[in-house]
Image: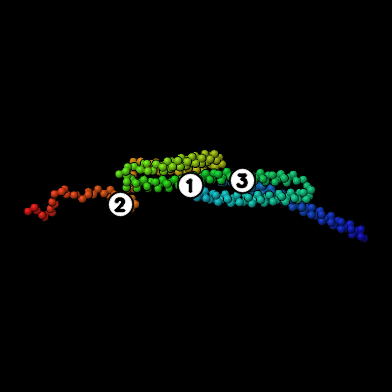
Amino acid sequence: MAAAKHRRKRCLDLVDVRRLKLEQIIRLSTCERDANQAISWIEELQETLRRDYNQVGCDETELRVLKKDREQLEDTARSTYHYGKELCQVALVLRRSLRMDSSPQKQLADKLEHIWGRLTRALTEHDARTHVCAAFNSACVQILKRIDELDRQAKEYLLTKGRRQGPPTLLFSVERRKLGSDVAELRHIGEMLVAQTNANHVASKEARSAAVSLVRQKVEEVEEKRNQLETIIDGRSVPEEDRFLVRGVPTSILTSTTSPPQVDPPGHIRIGDNESYL
């Protein structure tokens, strides 16, 4: 009787062991299946980045929206990667516990790292393109503001001091050189944007042409305003509409030709219209 109970206990213990092993096998299968799913999700996110986020525009609003969406995509991809990495670690522990070959799990972990590395490189490249585009937009805005300010100062100088001291060529020489250097740098950034846009064969030809046209329009606008400023600084032109006010003083006062009061010569006696020498 005691031997039968002992055998029964051993059988129950063996059943428990086999049940535990079976549960571990099922859990291992689930972990590796979910890890493969995480890899597939990361691949899908990389394809989404390549397809939908590859065309970088030059509109500030578009860039803000694109940056926000791209950050959300990166957060999703990062959480998916960490989830898959945890699954791979659990799967490795289970394989060792079950005394199973760990090579398939190591291959799965290597695949996860490879896919994640490709996505991070794609994100870095996207950030670089976005940074160039944002720098181009910022430079356009800042240069146009400086041109407007110099334009105002040059016109004010010509209307108040230009008649006596001549064109303000020397006065604005430093700003002109600095502005010329900044415009040349802006032109260089624009060429970089055009080159990277033309190299983007994922986007349609129409989308590439529209982006290139927008970049060139902005560069041409800056250069046109700079040329107008150069003309004003050299004293060759002051538009009539800018002669209306200078710091709130009407032009009629600035350009008044009223003659100074006459001074009688010594010994001269001035008489009124109703007076006579007699």
Instruction: For mark 2, give the secondary structure.
Output: strand
Q: Where is residue 149 in the image (x, y as percent from the top left)?
A: 40, 48
Q: Which amino acid does label 1 sit on?
A: Ser
Query: Quarter of the image containing the N terminus?
Result: bottom right
Per the rendering, the mark at residue 138 is 1
- The answer to which quarter of the image holds residue 5 is bottom right
Residue under circle 3?
A: 120
Is 90 placed left or right of 166 in the picture?
Answer: right
Disc nearest the viewer among 3 and 1: 1
Q: State the residue in front, 220 or 172.
A: 172
Residue pointed to by mark 2: 250
Kind of residue at disc 2:
Pro
Between disc 3 and disc 2, whose residue precedes?
3
Contact, CB < 8 Å: mark 3 with mark 1?
no
Q: Residues within 10 Å of mark 1 (few under 14, many from 20)?
A: few
Is 7 positioned to the left or the right of 107 in the image?
A: right
| Mark 1 or 2, nearer chain start | 1
Residue 256 pos. (x, y %): 26, 49
